[in-house]
Image (cartoon, helix red, strand yellow):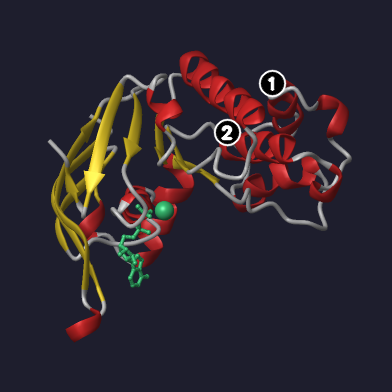
Amino acid sequence: MIVQMQNIRRIFGEGAARVVALDGIDLSIDPGEFIAIIGASGSGKSTLLQILGCLDRADEGSFFLDGSDVQSLSGSEMARVRNETIGFVFQSFHLLGDRDALENVSLPLEYRRGAVSSTRPREVLERVGLLDRITHRPSQLSAGERQRVAIARALVKEPRMVLCDEPTGNLDSDSGDQVLDLLSELRDELNTTLVIVTHDPQVARRADRVLTLKDGRWDA
Ligand code: ADP
Ligand code: MG
């Protein structure tokens, strides 16, 4: 089991502004699984993904990630687990505008010495079909190409798990399909655990398992 969550709760604000974003979530994920988490806007998808990715911490419940008891870790230990275990893909790509594709993909390696060869960013860009775009900046790429750069960046450190928040949300349906094909092929090739949160029902067709969130709980 790479993920084991029990009774996870996340509460924002106080008094009249109090929002229970996650209200008792259980979740177990096997290594290499492709999970789609769907649900309406505001149902808690991004909150859950942020907790899974060790970017945010639950208020209650237990969460084990690849054997680590995340709830008991300090902030810096959480950051280390995040850097070693997780790759992220976001709706709005989060690429640096003043760096070219190769530099964007190389960036995660600057924070980790040794271990990964310097030819790796090129190889991953080749795998996502962008070898002829390595010196292009994000503004010189289409939206679909930008998301493929972001996928290459997420994969450059060979993370055990890749988390995607609405990865097709800013793409037309053709490039959205290409991005989903790519993610699903890469999961098969690398046996990376893949979690995609989306309100796009198209994503669900490709997943091993589809889970639906409603008001911070699983919708049975
Ligand atoms: P989704 O991604 O499914 O659209 P979110 O996880 O972003 O939903 O949000 C779930 C609920 O939690 C929403 O009601 C949202 O307004 C609230 N929420 C999320 N993040 C915060 C925050 N940082 N502060 C206050 N409320 C938040
Ligand atoms: Mg969201």
Q: State if disc 2 and disc 1 touch (CB < 8 Å).
A: yes
The residue type indicated by label 1 comes to Arg
How far from the left and from the top, in percent, is residue 3? 25, 37
Name the residue beneath numbered marker 1. Answer: 127
The residue under the point 70% across, 29% down is 120
Between 153 and 75, the one nearer to me in the picture: 153
The residue type indicated by label 2 comes to Leu
The residue under the point 69% across, 24% down is 128
Residue 85 visible in the picture? yes
- Image quarter for residue 208? top left
Between 137 and 155, the one nearer to me in the picture: 137
Q: Can you say whether 42 is above or below 35 in the image?
A: below
How far from the left and from the top, in percent, is residue 62? 14, 52
Image check: 11 left or right of 111? left
Classed neighbour count for the residue bearing mark 2: other residues with Cα under 10 Å, few (<14), some (14–19), many (≥20): many
Q: Can you say whether 208 is above or below 70 in the image?
A: above
Image check: 60 left or right of 202? left
How far from the left and from the top, in percent, is residue 89? 54, 43
User: Which corner quadrant holds the N terminus?
Assistant: top left
Name the residue beneath numbered marker 2. Answer: 155
The residue under the point 78% across, 56% down is 97
Give the mark, 1 or 2, whose residue is nearer the N terminus: 1
